[in-house]
Amino acid sequence: MSSHKSTPDDLSQRIEALNYLSCEELLTLIEEIIDLLDVFPGFMGMDTIHAVELEPMPDTPDRGCLVVTPSGNIRELAIDIMPGPSSLGGYDYTEDIRDVELSSEELIWYRKQAVKLLWKLL
């Protein structure tokens, strides 16, 4: 995480210049926004999976469900739902957050999406 404690005002200027930031600058910006969040949100309102879903990049291969994690990384989230005890609502699930190989262009695109979504959460 970033060692510099930014404020929303500090970050807003950099967000306005989002299209001019390098891939590493985008990661730093993501980390700084995460530092300002009171609580990192749960995936689809869940308490057990902390991740923010990203929209798929148009005209690219299907990458599965890509998310930004509390560490600022872009990962694939796979949730397998299976029958479970009725005391748990009749189903159970397992989750796997795994690395995903993205081209430089894809990584920049997804990091920009992460910045926009996380910024809305402040």
Image (spheres, rainbow, N blue to C red):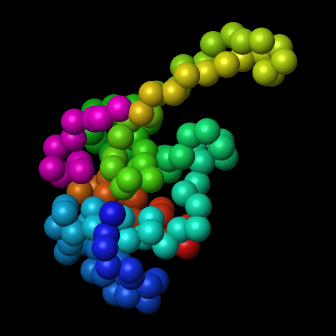
Q: Is residue 54 at all visible to an observer of this figure? A: no
Q: Is residue 101 magenta?
A: yes
Residue 23, image x, y percentages: 19, 61
Q: Is residue 36 at all visible to an observer of this figure? A: yes
Left or right: 85 in relation to 33: right
Is the N terminus in the top left, top right, bottom left or bottom right quadrant?
A: bottom left
Q: In this view, does 43 lie above or below 79?
A: below
Single out the residue that lies furthest toward the right. Answer: 87
Left or right: 58 in relation to 84: left
Residue 104, image x, y percentages: 15, 50
Left or right: 10 in relation to 51: left
Is the C terminus in the top left, top right, bottom left or bottom right quadrant?
A: bottom right
Look at 83% across and 14% down and name the residue there.
86
Query: What is the span of residues highlighted in magenta in the rendered image?
Result: 98-107
Residue 93, image x, y percentages: 61, 21
Q: Is residue 3 above or below residue 72?
A: below
Look at 46% across and 83% down and name the residue there.
8
Q: Is residue 49 above or below residue 40?
A: above
Left or right: 108 in relation to 52: left
Rendering quarter of residue 72: bottom left
